[in-house]
Amino acid sequence: MTLKSVAAALNVSTATISNAFNRPDQLSQALRRKILTECKKLGYHGPNATARTLRRGQSDAIGVMLSDPLAYYFTDPVASQFLTGIAEVLEQNRKQLLLLSGAESEDRKGGIESLADGFIVYGSQDENQLFMRVLETGKPVVTVDFDYKDYPSVNIDNYQAAFNIAHYLFNSGCTRPVVLGIRLIDSKRIGRIVEDELFEERESISRRRLNGYLDAAKDAGVDLPLQQIWHIPQNNHQLALQAASEVLSMYPLPDCVICMSDVVATAVLNVAHDRKIRVPDQLKVVGFDDIPEASRISPSLTTVSQHSIEKGRMAAKKVLSGGPQAKTKTLLPTQLTVRQSS
Amino acid sequence: MTLKSVAAALNVSTATISNAFNRPDQLSQALRRKILTECKKLGYHGPNATARTLRRGQSDAIGVMLSDPLAYYFTDPVASQFLTGIAEVLEQNRKQLLLLSGAESEDRKGGIESLADGFIVYGSQDENQLFMRVLETGKPVVTVDFDYKDYPSVNIDNYQAAFNIAHYLFNSGCTRPVVLGIRLIDSKRIGRIVEDELFEERESISRRRLNGYLDAAKDAGVDLPLQQIWHIPQNNHQLALQAASEVLSMYPLPDCVICMSDVVATAVLNVAHDRKIRVPDQLKVVGFDDIPEASRISPSLTTVSQHSIEKGRMAAKKVLSGGPQAKTKTLLPTQLTVRQSS
DNA sequence: GTGAAAGCGCTAACAT
DNA sequence: ATGTTAGCGCTTTCAC
């Protein structure tokens, strides 16, 4: 069933069939209705999407690109919320959502850029080839959680938010903090940071947050030496449990654990619970993100609320409206949300 | 940059460029290497995916179709795990993942079927037009969590699993159960089921689970009348909280709440915690699915473990290997996982 | 080992 | 209001 065969069957030209589907004003109501009815009868459900895309040079799809493997999109609560926001807006605008992985294997990525009309790129893409290629297409690109040149972006102020929550903590009397960081260095191991590892100054989210914590400590006169800073290679509960387990074996116990994500913080809460460490009496715990579980868990989690769904919506709106007002860099607000864990 | 223009620039035919990318054996090593190098220099990153798809009639993408809006994919923990499993297998096999919503608006869905080489259809699709169209394509289709004619499928035995967990509960002395069901009837309201509403006998997951609970009750001589059965229109924490709140206001309190999902069960646990109802002493709570949060929450949740990730993997493997051994209906095992909440 | 050419299914400019 | 036609970028058969 192709447009052509349908045209033949109905004794009209292909253009007319095409118009019946795409430009109702180009033919009489009567004819259009008749065509549509016949098509349904024949089992023709509209123009082939691929051919249409090729011809129009437009796919009605927006690509969302992450540097991690695809599975991460579904596993991480923050990524999930972000995607929820995107999906919502795209659906309203009748666009398809194409999930792209920057970790795509070298040979597989050929020509993928042409499948989408615009791209939302989530998370830093140093050296990612696919990202560079996407930029070359000249199609709308919005970066999220990082900045690239003059491209529009959606971000939060990671430094300030981190500063604020640490500041709050140090103000409530914490003096022996531990920081649980994510991807602070390029290593698969879990553990303390060693001096020179932190040397390379990348502009990652983690680094910004760390700087916020560090400055807040300095401000408050709290000692936060390198060996109190831990690295977890990925934001994942399993790994976080392991790190938490080690951290809560320290003697003396820290009086607070500052986590770079709620996923990590919930793991700390779990371990503390198992070991009968009382939160917040003996130990305060704070996270970052405000994922849904943060308010459900007991004790509920003090954290930095960032509206990840809104981030997704915002990013989607920006790619869709290629207009100049969308060419801006947006900084979404965050908020310190104090709950039971501190 | 098109294959043609590259061919012109390098003074070879388009076929040769195409071969350089797709069939290394069709030209000399030397020439191929040279072409590839030149292409990189010119900024040509491989054949346009759309044109390639059109010409080959193959997209290297697998469509995953859900009856709910796209956002649901990312919001529901079970769907997320399922997708994680799919993504894993597809990535290994270098296929793209195309998220499709059965709730696609009428006019938007034209020709989408052609975008994927095969389909995984998740959750019952009564009357869904897109589903019917997908079937018409003749491409591989795997149904998950429901069956359709002779198509291959991946399922669990919902009846038996539900029977088992209820049986266990009634054996541990519960006599005043409440069931919290999801989409038992076609209504947006939260509340008890009224007699005739349940009349229409659909083959939904919920209905199978309900039948399992009901038969287990009968078996154990426990009274489980219709007015102890509640309906929640969607598997979502918010709605579940509301239902839980009403259920836990009953007097006398039920001695157990049987939930059709862990999302609902965690909501019950939350409300119980707020009201200082002691679980499991005063109230036992069980769920279904075994989502990650089920083992983390306190008290941890007794539930039916189904390996949703494996379900995804299985489904993906089936679509990919169109072979006859994949034409079977698979029933994945489930397991009663007893934890603190009962 | 390499090139010429047909055509995948469609849309849009132009002609009638 | 409807029809004719070129061509989107590619792959593949066939000829050389």
Image: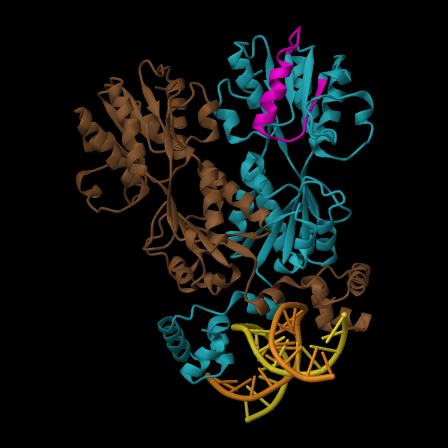
Chain colours: A cyan, B brown, C yellow, D orange
Q: Would residue B297 be found to the left or right of residue B26 on screen? A: left
Can you see residue A85? no
Residue B116 image point, x, y percent: 51, 59
Residue A255 image point, x, y percent: 64, 10
Give the image quarter of residue B26.
bottom right
Q: In the rendered image, which quarter contains the N terminus of chain B?
A: bottom right
Residue at image coords 77%, 65%? B28
Residue B298 image point, x, y percent: 45, 19
Q: In the rendered image, which quarter contains the C terminus of chain B?
A: top left
Question: How many marks on residues?
Answer: 0
Q: Would residue A126 be found to the left or right of residue B276 on screen? A: right
Give the image quarter of residue A207.
top right
Residue A88 image point, x, y percent: 51, 47
Magenta region includes residue A252: yes
Magenta region includes residue B302: no
Q: In this view, does A339 lie above or below C1?
A: above
Q: Is residue B331 above or below residue B269?
A: below
B286 or B322, nearer to the observer: B322
Q: Would residue B52 be found to the left or right of residue B45 on screen? A: left
Task: State which region is magenta.
Answer: A229-255
Can you see residue A147? yes
Residue at image coords 49%, 45%? B71
Residue at image coords 67%, 43%? A67
Residue at image coords 67%, 54%? A109
Q: Would residue B119 be found to the left or right of residue B41 on screen? A: left
Q: Is residue B277 above or below residue B126?
A: above
B214 or A262, nearer to the observer: B214
